[in-house]
């Protein structure tokens, strides 16, 4: 692995070199120290479910073919995957629950600091839940919606309300297969039960239950997080801002918010403008506060507030190496436990805020939603206190900061394409039907030090847009594209095929639409439903010329997302590493049989360009089945010269 470049980002590269000079270990060094990693674990054939083990099955057939209990590779691989799905669903959905609780607080406690920002969306969701809205105050509606949403986690009977948004044929299929999700918590518990020692041994049954649990995330917990965040913090609209480590500013108190829940980060944005905070910053000689995000909470405040993003998952350590970060405020998910040891080399304070996520020896300032604004101010004051301890000689902020446009919701795309007076998906459908746009690809997910940071995301997206595929992106994937300048309207002219470029230029949109954080992959599902409703592209999501990919995934949440996308009928490609490879039966199930069962399936491909072409071929097959017109133009040349514009 030492031969492979660690990143394609010059700012990251500079910081990695800086760490090497200072003798500071990073995630890449820990990965190298971990070599050789356990081959059984990599392939998913290591079972630690009970204490008769750990057991591992030899994939080459020279060692044991069964665990101590008799579980074969297919059972172990499927069971391990299912457990990851449950964990991913739990993480996304508990995030959704936190937002529902904050919405309840906003409704009941006017002093909480939370306000309802999108009343229109509140009413839409209320009606969807069958709640009375006429003559009721906003607070009363919000309370009813919050309680109804909280009820979705543990309701005794019935299907998830938001899952009813899926097209009729899809819902009928889910019911027929027994995978229509009910109460969200119940789906997680059921899957954890099913994967206990000596319960389910059948890979198909295990993975169908995995789909059911994953659907409870995509069409439940994640969708709820997205919608309630829009209601509480405002629905995003396209907004121009910047990303990469250059957004940190030496004269300012730099505060990084890292994690996932905007319940905290959005309040920090408010508090960072408080005159008392600004005065405190001035008193220590700082020129104000520079807030910047990392990971998905960064995406949340980026697309709603225009707060710049310092970077994606693998930037979290690199940001600290600038020597200019006074505090990194973490909440939940994707925050590396190694951060405090790295911060010890600098004046940087790591501050944990969630009762669910503490780090040994690290300052904990519990975020209490009842006094959210006050706690946010206390956190910022702690950051300001650290400013005078900064060692000026060690400050090393890379210059890279790149423009991007983010904040494309499924709702906003209507206005964007159809205009303010005739909002509609019609122009998008027409562009696909007429062969101007080939189809839509969702490129999402994490970064992984096993791979060159950002390379697969960028290679795949460039190849897709060059072939007239409209890309929607979220999470760390969108930030990787942003660092390459691909999230600007100008990028269409430079990188997109002629058909896609024509559409982008007509409405002034980038060829890659940043739809938000990973929970906002639910927006992609809704956009698919909108395209179907508009007509001309089939009756079910599996009819659409659409595909998904997570080329650099690492988190359990990514597996859950992959499963709900496939179960929704979408062809999905994952890059390496693959804990499904240890069982040819499970691989065959996921890559072939799934298509017959749910109309969507997996593929695994490490080469991003090859994977892009597999997605393109899939779209072409769907186009042919729908009898759409041939593509209008050839793909753009590989190095589309600026001069041609
Ligand atoms: Ni998604 Fe967001 Fe990034 Fe991966 Fe982590 S931040 S929720 S899990 S690493 S994309």
Image (tube, helix red, strand yellow):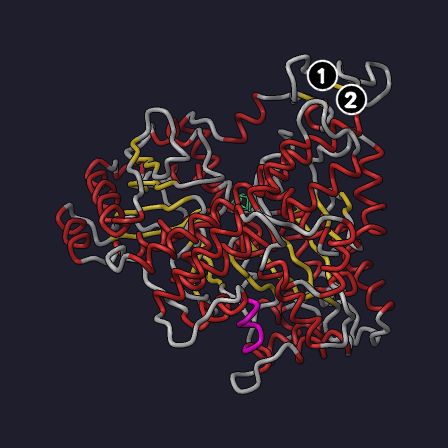
Query: Which image quarter is the N terminus in?
Result: top right
Where is residue 249 drawn, in percent x and y?
31, 51
Give the residue at the far bottom of this rendering. 421
Q: Nearer the viewer, residue 514 or 115?
A: 115
For the question of whether residue 223 can be seen, the reply is: yes
Q: Residue at x 51, y 83 (%)?
A: 420
**Mark 1 neighbour density, 10 Å: few (under 14) some (14–19) many (20 or more):** many
Q: Residue at x 32, y 62 (%)?
A: 115
Q: Nearer the viewer, residue 111 or 342?
A: 111
Give the residue at the far front of this rendering. 156
Query: Which image quarter is the C terminus in?
Result: bottom right
Horizontal side of residue 43 vs 477, given as left or right: right
Pointer 1: what residue? 55
Where is residue 25 drawn, in percent x and y?
46, 26
Pointer 2: what residue? 71
Which residues are the magenta region?
Answer: 409-415
| Badge nearest the viewer, 1 or 2 | 2
Horizontal side of residue 640 vs 285, given as left or right: right
Q: Are marks 1 and 2 in contact (CB under 8 Å)?
A: yes
Q: Does the stretch in magenta take in 122?
A: no
């Amino acid at each position: 692995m030492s031969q492979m470049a660690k990143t394609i980002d010059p700012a990251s590269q500079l910081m990695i070199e800086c760490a090497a000079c200072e003798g500071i270990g990073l995630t890449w060094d820990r990965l190298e120290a971990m070599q050789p990693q356990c081959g059984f674990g990599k392939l998913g054939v290591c079972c630690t479910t009970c204490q008769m083990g750990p057991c591992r099955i030899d994939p080459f057939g020279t060692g044991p073919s069964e665990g101590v209990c008799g579980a074969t590779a297919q059972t172990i691989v499927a069971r391990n995957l299912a457990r990851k799905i449950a964990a991913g669903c739990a993480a996304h959905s508990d995030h959704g629950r936190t937002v529902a609780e904050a919405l309840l607080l906003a409704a009941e406690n006017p002093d909480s600091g939370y306000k309802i920002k999108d009343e229109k969306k509140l009413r839409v969701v209320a009606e969807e839940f069958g709640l009375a809205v006429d003559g009721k105050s906003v607070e009363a509606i919000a309370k009813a919606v919050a309680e109804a949403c909280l009820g979705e986690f543990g309701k005794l009977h019935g299907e998830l309300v938001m899952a009813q948004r899926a097209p009729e044929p899809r819902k009928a299929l889910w019911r027929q297969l027994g995978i229509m999700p009910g109460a969200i918590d119940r789906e997680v518990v059921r899957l954890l039960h099913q994967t206990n020692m000596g319960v389910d041994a059948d890979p198909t049954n295990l993975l169908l239950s995995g789909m059911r649990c994953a659907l409870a995330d995509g069409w439940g917990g994640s969708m709820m997080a997205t919608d309630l965040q829009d209601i509480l913090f405002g629905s995003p609209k396209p907004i121009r801002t910047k990303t990469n480590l250059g957004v940190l500013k030496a004269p300012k108190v730099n505060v990084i918010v890292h994690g996932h829940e905007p319940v905290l980060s959005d309040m920090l944005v408010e508090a960072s403008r408080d005159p008392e905070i600004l005065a405190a910053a001035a008193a220590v000689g700082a020129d104000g506060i520079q807030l910047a995000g990392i990971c998905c909470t960064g995406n949340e405040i980026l697309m709603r507030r225009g707060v710049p993003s310092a970077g994606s998952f693998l930037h979290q350590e690199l940001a600290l190496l600038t020597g200019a970060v006074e505090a990194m405020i973490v909440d939940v998910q994707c925050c590396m436990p190694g951060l405090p040891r790295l911060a010890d080399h600098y004046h940087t304070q790591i501050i944990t805020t969630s009762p669910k996520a503490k780090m040994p020896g690290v300052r904990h300032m519990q975020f209490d939603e009842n006094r959210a604004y006050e706690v946010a101010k206390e956190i910022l004051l702690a950051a300001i206190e650290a400013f005078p301890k900064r060692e000026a000689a060690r400050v090393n902020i890379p210059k890279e900061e790149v423009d991007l446009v983010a904040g494309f919701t499924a709702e906003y795309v209507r206005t964007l394409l159809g205009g303010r007076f005739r909002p509609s998906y019609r122009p998008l459908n027409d562009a696909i039907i007429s062969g101007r746009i080939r189809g839509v690809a969702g490129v999402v997910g994490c970064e992984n030090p096993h791979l060159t940071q950002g390379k697969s995301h960028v290679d795949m997206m460039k190849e897709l847009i060059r072939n007239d595929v409209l890309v929607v992106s979220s999470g760390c994937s969108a930030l990787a594209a942003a660092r390459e300048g691909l999230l600007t309207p100008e990028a269409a002219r430079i990188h997109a095929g002629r058909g896609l470029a024509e559409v982008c230029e007509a409405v002034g949109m980038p060829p890659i639409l940043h739809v938000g954080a990973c929970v906002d992959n639910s927006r992609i599902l809704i956009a698919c439903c909108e395209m179907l409703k508009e007509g001309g592209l089939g009756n079910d999501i599996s009819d659409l010329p659409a595909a998904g990919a997570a080329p650099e995934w690492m988190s359990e949440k990514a597996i859950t997302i992959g499963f709900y996308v496939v179960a929704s009928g979408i062809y999905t490609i994952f890059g390496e590493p693959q804990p499904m490879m240890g069982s040819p039966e499970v691989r065959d199930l996921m890559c072939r049989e799934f298509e017959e069962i749910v109309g969507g399936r997996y593929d695994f491909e490490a080469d991003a360009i090859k994977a892009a072409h597999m997605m393109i071929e899939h779209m072409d097959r769907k186009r042919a089945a729908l009898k759409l017109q041939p593509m209008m133009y050839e793909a753009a040349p590989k190095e589309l010269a600026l001069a041609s514009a």
